């Protein structure tokens, strides 16, 4: 009786290191890490006509936790924000690295860094941890949004270290379902307000009776370069 493929990999040791390819040409530890990101809370980013935003499900159920201490969207620089899905501790390391990269660029060149340069460096770090022994891959999908001058930009980097630019994307729990809906409802002429409402409607449809606007936060950067953070009941104006 043939063993399932996962059991074959375990029996032959292909899943014991992040530096070994399986006979199918995959790195099993990277695949495991990608599965871990599916358990992370959902974040959706969107580039709009008047800026860019990331809306995240904070998924905080414990009343003892101070809500503002559990933010899922991080400020990287005055023109860049980010979110992550997966192992939160791994994400924190990458967020802090992105902040350092941005500040080093400001000190060196006296100008704000382009968002793509930040995501490229983060992707390079993630790739290194799939190539060298003694460390595991970062269990994180990393979403970065920012303004490149007046142009809104959105990027997502996966576990293996690839990254792409998107008009809109989702990471974390139910990301496939969310992206399927985004392909149906996304329009290139959406403003931030209409975009946030669109994403909230998608979450309502997917989460059903479990949807609670108080568990969400949105951070957006408008075309004037201003970062605004709203959460919980402050989002109700966007949901109308």
Image: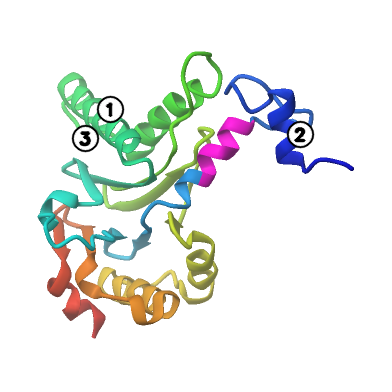
Spot occupied by residue 161 in the image (x, y as percentages of width and height): 50, 32
Q: Is residue 197 above or below residue 94?
A: below
Q: Is residue 171 above or below residue 198?
A: above
Q: How many marks?
A: 3
Q: Are marks 1 and 3 in contact (CB under 8 Å)?
A: no
Q: Is residue 73 magenta?
A: no
Give the residue pinned by disc 1.
97
Look at 59% across and 21% down and name the residue there: 17
Look at 29% across and 46% down and name the residue there: 82
Q: Is residue 109 above or below residue 76?
A: above
Spot occupied by residue 26 in the image (x, y as percentages of width and height): 69, 32
In terms of secondary structure, what is the magenta stretch mainly? helix
Q: Is residue 37 visible?
A: yes
Furthest-top residue in this view: 133
Look at 29% across and 48% down and name the residue there: 146
Gap in angstroms between the C-alphas marked 2 and 3: 50 Å
The boundaries of the magenta stretch are: 28-35
Give the residue pinned by disc 3.
112
């Amino acid at each position: 009786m043939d063993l399932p493929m996962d059991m074959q990999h375990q029996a032959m040791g292909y899943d014991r290191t992040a530096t070994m390819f399986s006979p199918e040409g995959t790195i099993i530890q990277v695949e495991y890490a990608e599965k871990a990101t599916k358990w992370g809370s959902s974040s959706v980013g969107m580039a709009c006509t008047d800026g860019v935003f990331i809306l995240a499900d904070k998924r905080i159920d414990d009343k003892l936790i101070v809500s503002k201490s559990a933010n899922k969207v991080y400020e990287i620089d005055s023109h860049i924000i980010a979110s992550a899905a997966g192992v939160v501790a791994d994400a924190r390391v990458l967020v802090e690295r992105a902040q350092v990269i941005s500040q080093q660029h400001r000190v060196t060149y006296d100008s704000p860094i382009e968002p793509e340069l930040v995501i490229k460096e983060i992707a390079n770090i993630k790739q290194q941890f799939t190539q060298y022994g003694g460390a595991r891959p970062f269990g994180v999908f990393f979403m970065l949004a920012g303004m490149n001058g007046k142009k809104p930009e959105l990027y997502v980097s996966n576990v293996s270290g690839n990254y792409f630019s998107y008009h809109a994307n989702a990471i974390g729990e139910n990301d496939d379902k969310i992206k399927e809906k985004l392909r149906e409802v996304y329009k290139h002429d959406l403003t931030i307000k209409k975009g946030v409402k669109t994403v909230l409607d998608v979450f309502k449809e997917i989460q059903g009776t479990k949807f609670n606007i108080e568990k969400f936060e949105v951070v957006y950067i408008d075309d004037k370069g201003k970062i605004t953070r709203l959460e919980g009941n402050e989002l109700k104006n966007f949901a109308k």
